Each structure stands twice: as structure tokens, then as C-alpha cells.
Image: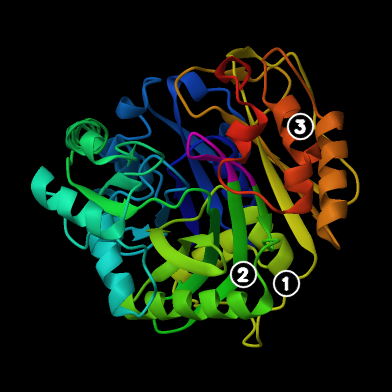
Amino acid sequence: MIRSLLIANRGEIAVRIIRTCKDMGIRTVAVYSQADADSLHTRMADQAICIGPAASSESYLNIRNIITAACVSRCDAIHPGVGFLSENPKFAEEVERAGLVFVGPTARTIRMLGDKVRSRHSATEAGVPVTPGSMEAITDAASAAELAQQIGYPVILKAAAGGGGRGMRIVKHAKELPNAITVASREALAFFSDGTIHMEKYLLNPRHVEIQLLSDGKGRVVHLGERDCSVQKNHQKLIEESPSPIINEQMRQQMGADSVRLFEHIGYRGAGTIEFLVEDGAYWFMEVNARVQVEHPVSELVSGTDIIRQQLLIAGGKGLDVPDEPLQLRGHALECRVNASTTGTVVKFNPPLGPGVRVDTHLFQGAKISPYYDSMIAKVIVHTPHRQLSIDTMVRALKEFVIEGVDTNIDSQIAILLSKPFRSGVFGTDLYTRLFPDPKKR
């Protein structure tokens, strides 16, 4: 049983974890950088410890300082949150070496899934469809050109250890391939300290759909339905929803069964997400996110499950506290990420309220938005009986949201929600660039 937990993160996810811990009677310890000394998560936790300067490399990515903070505050476990060290196998190893519980998968699992080439192998072994492409790392331009010819252009080069659009290059013609390999590998090395890349068939306008799973690490795996994350800007998600408007019950069952089988095959423990590309009624495995994700609230609302609570129960040896009956999604949930486009002090902050509206944030009047961390400052989540009502409720909530002192993307989010393609449910990952073709207005 976990009695005292250190949260190795900041912002809204730290606040989110603290709230569930309070419900469960778990003592919480927050860590913070000097830039976050007055942040909401430091106020809400039972104890707060400074772990370094503003730069994340010296604070939220400083493994030694975080583990020392957990030890001196007599914690039982560490929750990594999202981003930062959440998918760092060395961190998971060091946590357990210090005699603490890591709230997440094993270091071995994280290391295997962090390598996209190895994870494609695991998916294939489990009988999960993968996009056509290389099953090994790209080592030379000649073999890459031969493979690209076989699967057909366009192709996409991806960093084996990467994500978030880094180390990624789309190649439309054979003459572009040699230079793209060089650039993608160089970028992968710079961002992930690993220049390994692989190749996949590039789908021109797919949907990005993912399955949320929970596994106790002892053979029991359940899935909480799918999330559609197709609204993206530069490969960064903006709007997520569950259920997906393009997934029927038969495909939901098939994707769910494939996802459960893969987690059983690799012996996964904790909360995780399998991401798929969907096009023309077919789907292909893309990758596994070995952590809780930013968009987890939409799955919580349609499934009636507190995913953070389940993580803590699994890590504490209690197993899963979810029913055995088949999944039934209730209603429709929609999430919009509110991002700041400037830094500064929040001089006015009035979040939306009302039926079916939830706001996950670390903001308050007087909070400072610094340039050191991710630009996401809030998530607005709505849950209603059906999709069109969720869209209308979200538009109302975003129009009601008052944030003064910094610029945000609220207006562009409203524009997306009101667009004909989004309201119809028929769109792909190119929706954002179609709606905002002028880069200066994005």
C-alpha cells in the first residue's frame, strides 16, 4: 500500500495526481524548480521540496535530486506524471534501486517500447497489424531506397527513440530520400541521443486513434475504449474525444482485443496507451505510450474510471478495481488543450463552470507563465450524452473561459469546433492546416 507519494512533475498533471491522492488518503510531496516556487501544486501538496533552478535539465530531469527528495521526505513511491522522466527507463531503475515504488511499467518494458523498431516487432509477434515499413533500423540509403520503392511513396522516416514530431521526415520522391535520412538521423541524435531511424508508409490523411489500457502486470488487462486525437498542429494534439466518430462497435472490439493481446504479450504493468493510424476502415499499430497521457480525462469520463487511482492501486499491489463486465462507453467526452502563446502573469482567471464541464489546470490569478516549460496551461473537458451536445457545450465553455495577461489559443480552438469538417466528424490529421493555411495566422 502506498502511503506517501512524491510527484516528479509540475503543472496540471501534478495537481491532478494530488487530488486523487487526497481522495485515497495518500500523503503527497511536490517537487518544484525555482521558477515554480509559488505554483499551485506546491500549495496543494502536504510537503514541497525545491529540486533545482528553472531549467528542466537541472530540476525536473535531475534524477538524483528527485530521488533524494523522495528519500528525505520518506516517500514510498514516485509518480512520474507525463513528459519529463515519465518514459525514462534509467529513472525507473534508479527509483527501484532506491527501494521506492515506480508508478508505471518496469524499466525493461519502457526501454523496449521506447524503441519503435522493437515495439513494431512486439506488435507483429502479438498479431497486431503494423504499417508497411522497415522492421529494422535504416542503415544505408541504398537499402532504404529499395524498401521505399517496395512500399511506395510517400514514406515517413521516424526516430526510433523519438516522438512529438522530432526526428521525423516525410519523403514524397526518391531523390529526396538520401538527404532526408541524414537530416532525420541528425535530429534524432540531437533530441534523443540516438540517431537510429526507421521507415514506414506515409498515410496521406489518416485518423489518429488510440486505445487506453490498464494492466495489473499479473495477466489482467482491460481497455477503456478509444480516443480520437486527429486534431493536431505540428504533430502535437489539440483536441481529443471519446468515442471516435469513425469507429463502429465491430472495429472498437477488434482494436480493443488487439491492444489487450499486445499488453498481455509484453507483460505490461500500469496504465498505457496504444496508438493507431486509421484509414478506409483499416487500422495499423503506430506506438505505445508507456505512461498516463494528457488526454486521459476523456477516457475517465466515458468509462467512469479514475485512471490515476488505478495506477496507484496497481503500483501498491492492490490490482485493478474495475468491473469484469464488457466495456460500455457512457456518453461523449471532448477535451481541448489551452496553450499559452506568450509568457507573463495571469492578471484575471475565471474558468468555465456548469453542467458537464471539467477544467484541469494549475493556473490562478497571479500565476506566472514562464518560458521554461510546455505551453499547455489548462485542459477543458466536457461530458454529455452525445457528440453534438459535447461540441456545443465546449464552445460555450471556451467562450466563458477568461484568461487575461497572456495570449492563448482559445479562439482557434473555437474555430475548429465550429468548422463543418469537425462537426461532421469527417476529417483527418490535416484538419488544422486546412483551416489555417497561412502559417502567420496559426
Name the front one of labels 1 and 3.
Answer: 3
Q: Main secondary structure of the magenta part?
A: strand
Disc 2 target residue: 225
Disc 1 target residue: 329
Q: Are marks 1 and 2 in contact (CB under 8 Å)?
A: yes
CA gap, disc 1 and disc 2: 7 Å
- Density class for disc 2 (Cα within 10 Å; few <14, some 14-19, many ≥20) is many
Q: Position of residue 5 (x, y in %)?
A: 47, 52
* Mark closest to the chain's N terminus, 1 or 2: 2
Q: Amino acid at mark 3?
A: Ala
* Residue 238 is covered by the magenta coloring: yes
Residues in magenta? 231-239
Residue drawn at (56%, 47%) of the image: 294
Q: Amino acid at mark 2?
A: Gly
Q: Secondary structure at mark 1?
A: loop
Quarter holding the C terminus is top right
Report whether 134 appears left or right of 156: left
Q: Secondary structure at mark 2?
A: strand
Disc 3 target residue: 415
CA gap, disc 1 and disc 3: 28 Å
As drawn, the residue found furthest toward the right would be: 354
Q: Nearer the viewer, residue 198 or 367?
A: 198
- Density class for disc 1 (Cα within 10 Å; few <14, some 14-19, many ≥20) is some
Residue drawn at (40%, 59%) of the image: 286
Of the numbered discs in the image, which one, if any, rests on residue 311?
none
Q: Amino acid at mark 1?
A: Leu
Corner quadrant of residue 417: top right
- Density class for disc 3 (Cα within 10 Å; few <14, some 14-19, many ≥20) is some
* Residue 379 is covered by the magenta coloring: no
Residue drawn at (47%, 26%) of the image: 373
Residue 323, above or below 38 = below
Q: Is residue 361 visible?
A: no
